[in-house]
């Protein structure tokens, strides 16, 4: 009996090829859209966490509680003392891959009669490049060298001040004792990181010159620690906390695993909630498209149902036949949908979507938020979960869509079925 | 008839005397200028910056001609020693010995802290002429500051983009020195408070010798300027105010 229903179902969907094609097409497009949107949102969320870890938090961040509290002001005197000794000790901890110390301070950059404020990042160029990949972003000139009085600046900052490679700039700041100190630097390179805030406001110099400007010995404002396995951040952070116990490295120095960072801990979950809602709306639209198409497909076949009933087919068999047809159509549509959406997402996962080009260069450069989370290129992230979830969703909605008309049609008398067709 | 005239005269006399005393806001400011504006001066100043339980003392010497030209050299601490500042009208040029370069400050940069103090470069370039041109004045009555009678004047900017949109000044009625000044942003937020702590008499003028400025946007911070030495109306060579003097 079941095999007969299956055979009849298969025969039915191939009988009206046009109708079947358009129904499958609607499901395919809906599921394609769902797979792509899910991958895109997943990509944005994973990207933001990766970027925050790469640039802002490391896997463990060491910072004074006051510098953390006043991170916009960047109080210069809130330092981690003896930070080179501390870095060596941290490097000795199992699972630690990189230790990157920074000094960060507000400054004035001057060239000729032009002055612009900027945030100077004194870093170890080699280590910074290992976790941030800044050398790859250099458009003109070359990356920083540890011992040269050189600076790399962002493209937008260079445009603002009309600066070029080999130009000399004067960096001016007040040191930790409120003395004003200035040093000249040669611009070795101009980079484009894709983050408006970084490209517009940050100037990178070797850490030793940053320390010289602040007159702070071998102290740092932040130390970012990178691990072989990011999931060990809690354990490593606790070990660093034990080293920080004494006063050797300053008062109230904190060791913070990346999961406890303010942005990752609060802003990103909020972003996740917003994106979930957007995905919910997309799901609803896809569901409505499939529901509508399937519903219309069944409703317009009442006369056909009448013939089958007149030939002696039972209510249960009619119901099973309609659901079976929906199952076939849903399966084919959803399968094609995950193939198409999956293919598109997988391709864009490699090439990326240039968000900056999509919103326009000018608009993108105006998105000058002081937290670098979203890069200009977004890479969708296709997972098996997304594929499975979307496929099942397509199949389920296709079946649910025909349940009501299937019950209704199966209970119709042949005469009623013919009349309802005539009404249409 | 004559009796009646006398009667009216006696009646109006206090009004007449009072109106003589009723100085207008800018007349008061002009009288302040008589004290504050000099032909030339040489000064030695200690600038004491108090911030977060720390005291930083910076010593400097300055040559000035009128309100428009001044040349300041920092003598200590070691990191500031040799820093020279040349002010010509609204232009400020600074020589930094660490960089061996001269930097010209202009525009919004003038609002930055001068050498880590509560004073901004803009505070340094301010001239009384600017007050007359850019503010409208109003007398708010009289108040006492440190037991001295003061005129209270409220100045409101005629220009929209003014760092200190309103200024409230307490002027010593006898010596014509501003004893206190509150500087407000357009939003009404108090930005700075200036207090004169000590005033001395020099030949023909009163002059403040200790001034304290609090930048209310910096937490627990104030800057005290103590005048250690001042010589008025001395001869200063014109070459003092040339850019090449910064590099010497």
Image: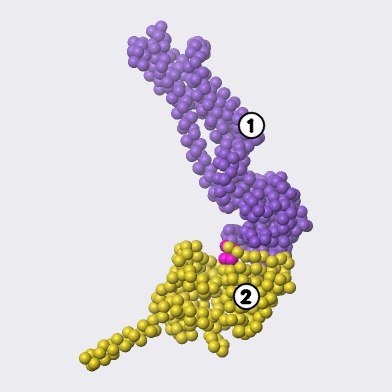
Q: Residue furthest front?
A: B1
- Which residues, given as a range, are shown in magenta? B108-112
Q: Residue furthest bottom?
A: B3
Q: Work out whether residue B64 or residue A394 is closer to the camera in this orientation and state it.
A: B64
Quadrant in the rendering for residue B214: bottom right
Point 52% across, 40% down: residue? A275
Chain letter for the purple colouring in the rendering: A
> Residue A365 vs residue A413: left or right?
right
Query: Which residue carries the number 2 mark?
Result: B70
Query: Which residue carries the number 1 mark?
Result: A347
Point 45% across, 28% down: residue? A288
Percent x, y for residue A415?
34, 10
Magenta span dominant secondary structure: helix
Residue A97 seen: no
Percent x, y for residue A168?
72, 58
Using a 10 Å C-alpha cutoff, classify the residue at mark 1 as few (fewer than 14 neighbours), some (14 to 19) or many (20 or more): some
Magenta stretch contains residue B110:
yes
Residue B241 seen: yes
Q: How is the image coloured?
A: by chain
Point 61% across, 28% down: residue? A343
The secondary element bearing badge 2 is classed as: strand
Shown colour of chain B: yellow
Quadrant in the rendering for residue A85: bottom right
Q: Which quarter shows the C terminus of chain A? A: top left
> Residue A202 vs residue B159: left or right?
right
Q: Chain of mark 1?
A: A
* Both marks 2 and 1 on one chain: no
Percent x, y for residue A331?
54, 22
């Amino acid at each position: 009996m079941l095999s007969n229903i299956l055979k009849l179902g298969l025969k039915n969907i191939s009988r009206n090829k046009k109708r079947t094609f358009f129904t499958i097409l609607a499901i395919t497009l809906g599921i394609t859209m769902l797979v792509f949107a899910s991958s895109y949102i997943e990509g944005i969320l994973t990207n933001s966490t990766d970027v925050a870890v790469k640039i802002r938090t490391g896997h463990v961040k060491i910072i004074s509680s006051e510098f953390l509290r006043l991170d916009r002001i960047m109080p210069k005197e809130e330092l981690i003392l003896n930070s080179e000794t501390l870095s060596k000790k941290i490097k000795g901890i199992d699972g630690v891959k990189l230790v990157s110390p920074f000094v960060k301070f507000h400054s004035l950059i001057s060239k000729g009669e032009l002055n612009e404020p900027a945030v100077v990042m004194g870093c170890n160029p080699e280590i910074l490049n290992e976790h941030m990949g800044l050398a790859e972003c250099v458009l003109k000139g070359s990356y920083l060298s540890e011992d040269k009085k050189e600076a790399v600046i962002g493209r937008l900052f260079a445009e603002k001040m009309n600066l070029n490679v080999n130009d000399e700039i004067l960096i001016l700041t007040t040191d930790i004792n409120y003395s004003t100190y200035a040093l000249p630097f040669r611009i070795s390179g101009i980079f484009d990181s894709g983050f408006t805030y970084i490209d517009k406001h940050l100037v990178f110099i070797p850490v030793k010159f940053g320390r010289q400007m602040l007159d702070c010995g071998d102290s740092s404002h932040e130390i970012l620690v990178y691990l072989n396995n990011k999931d060990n951040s809690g354990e490593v952070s606790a070990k660093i906390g034990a080293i920080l116990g004494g006063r050797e490295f300053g008062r109230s120095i904190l060791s913070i695993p990346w999961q406890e960072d303010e942005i990752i801990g609060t802003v990103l979950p909020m972003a996740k909630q917003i994106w979930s809602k957007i995905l919910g709306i997309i799901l609803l639209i896809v569901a409505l498209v499939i529901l509508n198409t399937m519903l219309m497909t069944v409703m317009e076949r009442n006369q056909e149902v009448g013939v089958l009933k007149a030939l002696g087919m039972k209510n249960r068999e009619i119901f099973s036949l309609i659901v079976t047809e929906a199952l076939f159509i849903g399966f084919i549509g959803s399968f094609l949908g995950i193939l198409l959406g999956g293919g598109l997402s997988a391709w864009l996962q490699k090439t990326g979507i240039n968000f900056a080009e999509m919103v326009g260069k000018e608009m993108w450069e105006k998105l000058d938020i002081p937290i670098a989370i979203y890069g200009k290129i977004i890479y969708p992230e296709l997972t098996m979960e997304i594929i499975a979830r979307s496929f099942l969703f397509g199949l389920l909605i296709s079946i649910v869509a025909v349940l009501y008309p299937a019950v209704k049609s199966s209970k119709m008398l042949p005469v009623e079925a013919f009349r309802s067709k005539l009404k249409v | 008839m004559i009796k009646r005239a006398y009667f009216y005269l006696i009646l109006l006399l206090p009004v007449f005397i009072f109106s003589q005393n009723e100085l207008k806001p800018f007349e008061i400011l002009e009288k302040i200028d008589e004290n504050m504006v000099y032909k030339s001066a040489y000064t030695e100043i200690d600038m004491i910056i108090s911030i977060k339980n720390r005291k930083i003392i910076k010593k400097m010497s300055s040559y000035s001609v009128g309100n428009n030209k001044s040349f300041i050299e920092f003598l200590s601490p070691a990191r500031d020693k040799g820093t020279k500042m040349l002010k010509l009208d609204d232009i400020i040029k600074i020589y930094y010995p660490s960089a061996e370069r001269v930097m010209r400050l202009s525009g919004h940069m003038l609002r930055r802290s001068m050498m880590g103090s509560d004073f901004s470069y803009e505070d340094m370039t301010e001239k009384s002429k600017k007050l007359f041109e850019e503010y409208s004045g109003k007398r708010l009555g009289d108040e006492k500051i440190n037991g001295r009678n003061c005129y209270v004047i409220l100045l409101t900017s005629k220009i929209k983009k003014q760092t200190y949109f309103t200024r409230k000044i307490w002027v010593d009625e006898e010596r014509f020195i501003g004893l206190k000044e509150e500087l407000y942003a357009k939003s009404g937020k108090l930005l700075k408070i200036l207090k004169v702590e000590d005033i001395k008499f020099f030949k023909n003028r009163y002059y403040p010798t200790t001034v304290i400025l609090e930048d209310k946007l910096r937490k627990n911070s104030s800057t005290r300027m103590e005048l250690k030495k001042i010589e008025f109306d001395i001869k200063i060579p014109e070459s003092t105010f040339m850019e090449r003097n910064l590099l010497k």
